[in-house]
Amino acid sequence: MALAEATKKLYNKLTWTWNPGSDKEAGDAIVKNVMLHWFPNKISKASLAWNYSFYLGTISFVLFMILTLTGVVLMFLYVPSVERAYASVKDLEYVISFGWLLRGVHRIAAHLMVAVVFLHMVRVFLTGAYKNGSAVGANRPLNWIIGLVLLVMTLLLSFTGYLLPWDQLAFWAITVGTNIASAAPLVGDWIHFLLLGGNSIDQGALIRFYVLHVFFLPVVVLLLFSWHMWRVRKDGGLAVVDHEVLDQKAEKVEPVKSKTYSLLGITNGTTVHVQNTMVDEEKNSVPSIPNLTRRIWLVTVATFVVTVILTMLFRAPLETPANPSVTPNPAKAPWYFLWLQEIVTDTTINLGFITINGALIGGILLPGLLLGLAVWWPYRDKSSNNSVGVWFADERRRQNMVFLGIVLLILVFTVIGTYLRGPYWNFYWPWEAWPEMPVKF
Amino acid sequence: MKLFGKTKSIPQPTNGAKEDESRRSFMHKLGLGGMIAGLAGFGFQSFRSLIPNVLFEPPMKFKIGTPASIAEGMTFLEDKRLYIFKEGKSFYAISGSCTHLGCTVKYTKLNAPKQVEIDGEKKNIPFEFHCPCHGSKFYADGTNYAGPAPAPLHWYKLEVSPDDGQLVVNMNNEVEQNFRLTV
């Protein structure tokens, strides 16, 4: 009896924060549970809405966690050596119990993460969520830039990941990727040498990309992610909240009594709660537990289920072992780099006296320019507070059109690269048959 | 006992205080500077260790057999990604690495030789090189004419080894397109 009692007591002690009995307990739970400490005590209904954020950031993080968990197990099974890498991936696929599932989930989650992080960026742009609202100390443009770096990190993680199997795709991806780096003026050859740890693609290159993939880049992502989340809180929550504050000010309601000190004690400045009285207001907000935690749980489960189902439907390919003498024909990058492959094909320019390699223009200058434009944009955007946190605000119509135009161009190039390019990167309609190519001449 | 942080509160002669302050500030800067220098040195040596001093790579200068052992026409050296051509008694070598992004170009025999003009000179071209990655095309002499490749394929120097008469390719030594080694 006493044992059962004690067990129940212990169970309650461990779980009460996840299932609070009252709003007061829900507030205490945020303070007492490190996992829930990330969340605010109360959260506005608007920022919980599915059709505002689509939870794309949450999904990105869930995918990152899936990638970390499967990745750690894969580290026990994969051997980063030129002689054994291919065989160890083949073993994963055909010998090790559930190895195919592990590798498949890792691969699908990586593909999804690229797509979801990109969509997250599109969402933030179209809702004007990189703009500062009324919260004091907000610096949303900075968080937008952190997000851009996270997008680049996601792409680098994918790039360093898909060359680990050391098959044909891997080998020619490194060849093209590192040669793009060497097209950079002045330092290009040096960077190429440093990336490969020599002049040829061999063990030195594999181990470098492996360490970047399993340690360096994930750690950078984790640090940037923490900063990203912390900034969301510092900036007064999702941008849609700022829009609600404007609505509230228009209503001219009596300001509610609100505490003017933060939980952390007396510090310089004021907290966002002082400016945004509605944050604590009953009709606009609800306790984070269970309203936010329940939704995040749902998103987590859904993301996991979708990933596993997609893994069942699309088995991970493994090409023939890396062969430096035979380039596959056509040699295609993964879909998210095909727009770049299409661009480096089309941008070699002959100025008469000098020919500029498309690798420099399409591989370095153009993507760099796009990134620079994205960094600069929030500082150029002079639209009013009314278009913060609103989908397709009228004021920002022209900006959204330009942005969507660029996104559309990237998509068009991706589609051309994926479906309309055949052997020798020639143009073929989807219904045209490709000529038969000898595998080896 | 005098604690480090408490020394300020101890009464000091007024003219000595300023001196003390600047000494303290100097020691502070010295400590900070030492720490930064140490970290920078540590960072540098870590980074420097990643730049190899010795490379265990296949040599760029290598033998490929006696002139008689090489077949007439084209021979492709797979692991070197190098095309060797033999026309009677003359030899030349063209790189198989595309000048755009380094994929291996494919030797493509034309059904009928075509006549093209390269640098104002009319030439009969019996074959071409095509790149599978981004569709660059090169004439038989390596001249680029289509696709994103910015430069012609590299030609490398051939020599005869004095010791055993084998042909030697030197991939560190680029030569002009009119280079021929006649044996």
Image (tube, rainbow, N blue to C red):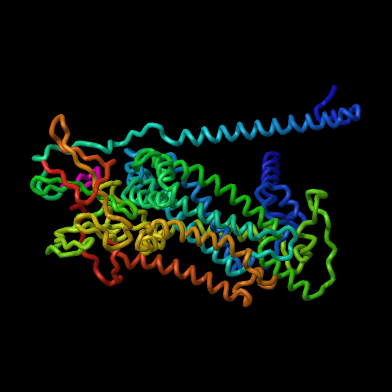
Splitting the image into 4 quarters, where does residue A293 fall? bottom right
Which of B2 and A168 lies nearest the eye of the viewer?
A: B2
Report how many numbered discs are placed on residues in the image. Answer: 0
Residue found at the far top of this picture: B1
Splitting the image into 4 quarters, where does residue A233 fall? bottom right
**Residue at 32% in and 38% down:** A83
Q: Is residue A89 above or below residue B166?
A: below
**Residue at 59% in and 74% down:** A392
Q: Quadrant of the N terminus of chain A?
A: top right
The answer to whether residue A114 is magenta is: no
Q: Is residue A277 above or below residue A227?
A: below
Residue A256 position, x and y percent, is 83, 66
> Looking at the image, can residue A80 be seen?
no
Q: Is residue A422 left or right of residue A195?
A: left
Read off the magenta span.
Answer: B75-82
Residue A230 position, x and y percent, is 66, 53
**Residue at 16% in and 60% down:** B125
Residue B58 position, x and y percent, is 28, 36
Splitting the image into 4 quarters, where does residue B131 fall? bottom left
Which of B181 and B6 lies nearest the eye of the viewer?
A: B181
> Looking at the image, can residue A359 be seen?
yes
Which of B127 and A220 lies nearest the eye of the viewer?
A: B127
Residue A240 position, x and y percent, is 67, 67
